[in-house]
Amino acid sequence: MTEPIRTVDVWRNGGPAHTDQVAVETPVALVFNGISHAVMMATPTDLEAFALGFALSEGLLLSRAECYGIEVVEGDAGIEVQIDVATAAEVRLKDQRRSLAGRTGCGLCGIDSLVRLDLSPEALVPAPWVASLTPDTVQRALAAMGGRQPINAATGACHAAGWADTRGDIVDVAEDVGRHNALDKLLGRRAAAGLANGEGFVVMSSRASYELVRKCARLGVPALATISAPTSLAIDIARAAGLTLYGFVRPGQAVRYAGGNPGRPLV
C-alpha cells in the first residue's frame, strides 16, 4: 500500500539541497457493488474506515449492517476501494448517484442539481450530558489532539478529526489531507467497532463547514468543536439538528454558535 509520507529534495531559503517530508495525496475511487460513485483525493491510510464513514455520513448506507465487505485494491492510476453493500443500499445509491470529483477543499463536489442538496437534518436525540459540556472541556480536547497527529507532525499538511469523551480526553484521531476525509475515517472507525452511539464529541483542526456539521448530524454526533470559524450554513444546520457547535477553540477561548446549555455564556 502507498505510504502516507514521501521524502523529497527541497532548497530552503536558497540554501543547499536537503530532504523534507510531504504528505501523500492520491486518487481514491469508492466503488459500490461495481458502481463507481466518487473519486476523492485522500491520504492513503485507513481507507476501509474512510469508505464506511463516507457511505454512512453521506446517507448511502443507513447502518453498518448494510455493508457486507470492503476491499482495497491499488492500481497504477490510484486506489480503488470496493464496497459490497445490500441491495437496498445499491438502489438508494443509484437514486442518489452523483458524479463527484473530490478535492481537498470544499464545495458541492459535483452534485448535479440544487434539489439534491440535503440541508434539513432530522433533530438529534437529546444527549443529556451535552448540557454540561464546557469551553474548558472542548479546549482541552483540541489541545490534546495535536500530540496524536504523526503525519501532520512530519509534514504540516494534514487535517485531523478526533473523538473526545465527555471529559475532553481524546480517545481516537484520524488524519487526512482533506478535513472531510479525516472525519469520515474517524466516523467509519467508530462504526466498524460498534461505537457509533457512544458518548462523546468530535473535534477538528479546521473550520466548521456545513458538510462537517451535516455528516455529524447524520450519524448522531451531538457536538462538534473546531479550531477555526463556522460558516453561516454550518450554524444553521447545527441549530436545526440540535447539535452543539463550538468554533474558534483556542487556548483561553471557545465560541459556542449552537446548542448547549442556554444558561451558559457563549464565550
Image: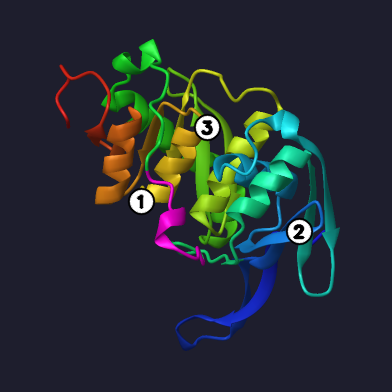
| Residue occupying image coordinates x 52% and y 64% | 104
Is 8 left, or right, of 253 in this rendering? right
Sequence order check, earlier mark of 1 and 2: 2
| Residue occupying image coordinates x 67% and y 53% | 94
Is 52 left, or right, of 101 in this rendering? right
Figure quadrant of the N terminus: bottom right
Residue 126 in the image: state x and y as whole percent: 38, 16
| Residue occupying image coordinates x 46% and y 55% | 116
Q: Residues within 10 Å of mark 1 (few under 14, many from 20)?
A: some
Q: Which residues are magenta?
A: 110-119
What numbered label is drawn on residue 207?
1
Figure quadrant of the C terminus: top left
Q: Amino acid at mark 2?
A: Ile
Q: Is residue 2 above or below residue 237?
A: below
Residue 59 in the image: state x and y as whole percent: 57, 41
Q: Residues within 10 Å of mark 2 (few under 14, many from 20)?
A: some
Q: Amino acid at mark 3?
A: Leu
Sequence order check, earlier mark of 3 and 2: 2
Q: Secondary structure at mark 3?
A: loop
Cα gap from disc 1 to disc 2, whole angstroms: 32 Å
Pair 3/1: label in front:
3
Residue situated in front as seen by the camera: 130 or 254: 130
Q: Secondary structure at mark 2?
A: strand
Q: Is residue 107 at least partly visible in the picture? A: no
Q: Is residue 191 above or below residue 26?
A: above
Residue denoted by label 2 = 35
Residue denoted by label 3 = 219
Q: Are marks 1 and 2 in contact (CB under 8 Å)?
A: no
Sequence order check, earlier mark of 3 and 1: 1
Residue 103 in the image: state x and y as whole percent: 53, 66
Pair 3/2: label in front:
2
Cα gap from disc 3 to disc 1, whole angstroms: 19 Å
